[in-house]
Structures are given as structure tokens and as C-alpha cells.
Image: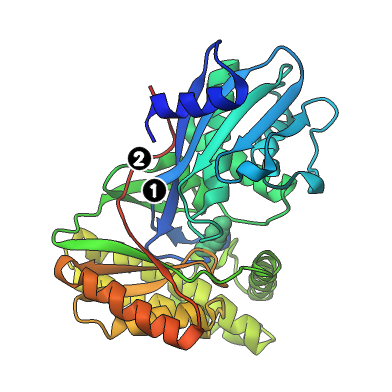
């Protein structure tokens, strides 16, 4: 959507006049390094060219009006920065952007006048491509523009995570908000979540595409399962800390971990921690391979990553497993794995140009035959992090 169209849509809802701020905030896909970000490990995500569009204008009173072009039937959702600032279970999607208003206030940036906002998203719903992080970081950028704050994108990412953890109650790591805020066209970000040091790695996929398959599975219990995995890892870490002077599982090599595995007193927790340790090491190796131009070997590590999330971490399920396993059979598929939190959501694959059509057709047919409903496929491009549209 271009800026003119966005402003036109805004004005249809709220009327013309005044200064209108426009922002784009992308979704993200993680190429490798799953469930490592809250374990002090590495991740390797990139921002996409699909995302969330915002148009917003300041008001004279304390009301905040949200309108989503994706849910026109909900109409304008009204909140108030004085009387309706805390999480409000009756106010649905508005809790994601509103959480950022609360977060800015928590960080000393008081907002004393409300605003009207029009939001339109091009990320498929509940797909695991970080629509919530996209909304949060986008809202932060809008608040910067409306009220003259100069919070840099990296800090907006941290605020987004703060808001998701404290306001919306999901104990997520930093990967999604970081990828959304800091993305760079045609690059993935190699981020050390323990230090927030990062480096951009060009993803030069000559003759290949990134294909995302959306399982369309309803993600019912995803948030509680996510929090459960996180606490299993925390318990395993505290067991290892009885002998190891570490702050996070991401500090361990495979050998160090195996040498101390008996400290972990449950088989399930052992597998959870094993995933966190091995996946982190795999991510470091994968980035080296990509830098050396060995995309085939990178793809193999994507496949291994999937198996680890399936067998050790148990966050895939039949839908994501079907997509991955059918992908691996396709000639021209370099690698495929689940991406994001799991429990439904999406898989990501790297596929040779000439194989894309057959990949989408064949994996789509097999998926439908086995699961009973269709998956959706998207050939995506790597884009920039959250920015003001001008
Ligand atoms: C979700 C979370 C991230 C990360 C991934 C799993 O997307 O928001 O912080 O933990 O799951 O890698």
C-alpha cells in the first residue's frame, strides 16, 4: 500500500485535515536459531516486505481510536490514555498497540493527548510471522513521530518485548521485535541474544527463493505451551548451574553440555536443554556456511534444526512435520523447517527458482490429503526494518 492510499483510508474513517503520520513495520521470518533467544543463544531472522501499515493523527482529548482495515466489522475501538490504559481483555487486538503507549509511559515518556489510528496488515493472520511484534514496533515508531520522542529502533524493539511480556503476558524473547525493528533489505541478522550484538549477513539467493508455507492450524494453546518450554529450560539451567558457572544455556558447547547432562533430573528437560544448546551451535555454524557461500550445507542444517524442534523440543506437530517432510522430498528444495514459536504457524524453505511451482503444488497437495485442509504458500522478499513512510 502506498502512502496516498493509506492516508485516503485513514481519512475515510476519521475525516481529513491535520498532520497524518505514516509508518510501515515488517513481519519477520527466522531462517535458523529457534527457541534460542530466551536461552542466551543466537538467532538468524530477516524482516519481510509484508507487514503492518499505520496512519495516525494526534487528538485534542485523551481518547485513542484504533481501526483495523483487516477487521472492519469491529469498527473503531475506543480506548483512553487516562481511564483505559492497562490491558483490557474486552478490547481485543487494540491491546498490542495500546501496550506500547503504556510501555512508553512506564519508561517516563508520558503521552497526554490521544490519537486516531488506522492499521492495515498484510501478514497472514496467526501465521507465526510476528504480526504482533510488527504492530508493537510500528506503534512505537508512530508514537515517536506524533509526540517527538527519538527512541531509536533498537530500543523500540526492547520496548516491544517489554510490552509483550508485561502488558500482554507472553514471555517471548527479543528475536521478533529485534528483527522487525532492525531488518535490512536482502540481509538476515545474526544476533547474539545474550549481548544484543548483531551483524548483517547478506542473503544472496541467486536462482533461489524463500518460500513460506502457512499451516493454517489454529494456534489454540500456543502461548501457554511457549511459556512452559521456557520454564523447562530455566529449570534445566538451574540444575546445570549447580556445577557450571553459566548464565544461560547458550554459553555451552555440545561437549560441555553432554559432560554435565546427568545434572538434569528429567529426561524431558534434558531434551529441551539439548535442543537449546545444539540449535545455538547449529546457528553459528549455519551463518559461517552461508558466508562461505555454501547454501546446500546451510539447507541441511535447516533440516536438522526442524528435527530438533520436532523430537527434542516438541513444538512442531503433524502439520509442520508434514510440510517439512514433504519439502525434503522435492528436487530443488535446499532446506526446510518450521519457523517461529511452532505449534502451527509457518514453515520456511529455500527453493530453487525452477522448482518453486512444483514445490508449492506438490507440498500443497500432500498437505491437504494428509491434514484435511489447505496450506497457503508465499514467496517472500527480505525487506527493511520499521520506517516512517514519506
Ligand atoms: C516466538 C517468540 C520469539 C522466539 C520464537 C522461537 O516467535 O516471540 O521470541 O522465542 O518464538 O524461536
- Asked if residue 220 is positioned above or below residue 366 in the image, the reply reads above
Which residue is more in the foreground, 232 or 379? 379
Question: Residue shown at 52%/36% (left/top)?
Answer: 138
- State left or right for residue 211 relative to residue 104: left
> Residue 212 at what x, y percent from top left?
37, 64
Q: Is residue 77 left or right of residue 355?
A: right
Q: Name the quadrant of the N terminus.
A: top left
Circles 1 and 2: CB atoms closer than 8 Å: yes
Residue 275 left/right relative to 349: right
Q: Residue at coordinates 51% horizontally, 51% vertically from top-left?
A: 176
Observer-nearest of 161 and 6: 6
| Label 1 residue near ligand 1, CB within 8 Å | no
Per the image, the residue denoted by label 1 is 47
Judge left or right: residue 151 versus residue 203.
Answer: right
174 relative to 270, above or below: above
Instruction: Tell me where residue 179 appears, x and y as whole percent.
Output: 44, 48
Asked where in the image residue 348 lies, by quadrant, the reply is: bottom left
- Considering every residue shown, the one lying at the far right of the view is 83
Quadrant in the picture for residue 267: bottom right
Residue 28: x and y in percent read 43, 52
Residue identified by numbered label 2: 384
Disc number at residue 243?
A: none
Q: Answer whether residue 145 is visible to the viewer in this image.
A: yes
- Quadrant where the image shows the C terminus: top left
What residue sits 50% from the left and 29% below the top?
A: 9
Q: N-terminal of the two: label 1 or label 2?
A: 1
Reply above or below: 333 against 111.
Answer: below
Disc 2, ligand 1: is the CB inside 8 Å? no
Q: Residues within 10 Å of mark 1 (few under 14, many from 20)?
A: many
Amino acid at each position: 500500500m502506498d502512502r496516498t492510499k493509506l492516508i485516503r483510508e485513514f481519512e475515510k474513517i476519521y475525516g481529513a485535515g491535520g498532520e497524518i503520520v505514516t509508518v510501515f513495520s515488517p513481519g519477520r521470518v527466522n531462517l535458523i536459531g529457534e527457541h534460542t533467544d530466551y536461552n542466551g543463544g543466537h538467532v538468524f531472522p530477516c524482516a519481510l516486505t509484508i507487514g503492518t501499515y499505520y496512519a495516525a493523527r494526534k487528538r485534542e482529548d485523551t481518547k485513542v481510536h484504533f481501526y483495523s482495515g483487516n477487521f472492519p466489522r469491529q469498527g473503531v475501538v475506543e480506548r483512553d490514555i487516562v481511564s483505559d490504559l492497562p490491558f483490557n481483555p474486552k478490547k481485543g487486538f487494540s491491546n498490542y498497540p495500546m501496550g506500547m503507549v503504556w510501555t512508553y509511559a512506564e519508561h517516563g515518556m508520558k503521552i497526554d493527548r490521544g490519537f486516531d489510528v488506522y492499521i492495515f496488515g498484510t501478514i497472514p493472520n496467526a501465521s507465526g510471522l510476528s504480526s504482533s511484534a510488527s504492530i508493537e514496533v510500528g506503534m512505537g515508531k508512530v508514537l515517536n513521530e506524533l509526540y517527538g520522542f527519538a527512541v531509536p529502533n533498537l530500543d523500540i524493539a526492547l520496548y516491544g518485548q517489554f510490552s509483550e511480556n508485561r502488558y500482554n503476558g507472553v514471555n517471548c524473547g527479543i528475536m521478533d521485535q529485534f528483527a522487525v525493528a532492525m531488518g535490512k533489505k536482502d540481509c538476515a541478522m545474526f544476533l547474539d541474544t545474550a549481548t544484543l550484538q548483531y551483524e548483517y549477513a547478506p542473503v544472496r539467493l541467486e536462482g533461489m527463493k524463500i518460500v513460506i508455507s502457512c499451516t493454517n492450524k489454529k494456534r489454540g494453546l500456543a502461548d501457554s505451551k511457549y511459556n512452559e518450554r521456557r520454564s523447562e529450560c530455566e529449570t534445566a539451567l538451574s540444575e546445570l548451574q549447580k556445577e557450571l558457572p553459566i548464565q544461560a544455556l547458550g554459553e555451552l558447547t555440545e561437549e560441555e553440555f553432554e559432560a554435565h547432562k546427568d545434572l538434569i533430573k528429567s529426561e524431558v528437560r534434558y531434551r529441551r536443554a539439548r535442543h537449546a544448546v545444539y540449535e545455538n551451535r547449529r546457528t553459528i555454524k549455519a551463518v559461517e556456511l552461508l558466508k562461505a557461500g555454501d547454501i546446500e550445507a546451510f539447507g541441511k542444517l535447516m533440516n536438522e534444526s526442524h528435527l530438533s524442534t520436532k523430537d527434542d523440543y516438541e513444538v512442531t506437530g503433524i502439520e509442520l512435520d508434514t510440510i517439512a517432510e514433504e519439502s525434503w522430498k522435492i528436487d530443488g528444495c535446499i532446506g526446510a523447517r518450521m519457523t517461529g514459536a511452532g505449534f502451527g504457524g509457518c514453515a520456511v524453505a529455500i527453493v530453487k527458482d525452477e522448482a518453486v511451482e512444483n514445490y508449492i503444488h506438490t507440498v500443497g497437495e500432500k498437505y491437504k490429503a494428509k491434514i484435511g485442509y489447505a496450506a497457503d504458500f508465499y514467496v517472500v522478499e527480505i525487506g527493511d526494518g520499521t520506517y516512517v513512510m514519506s
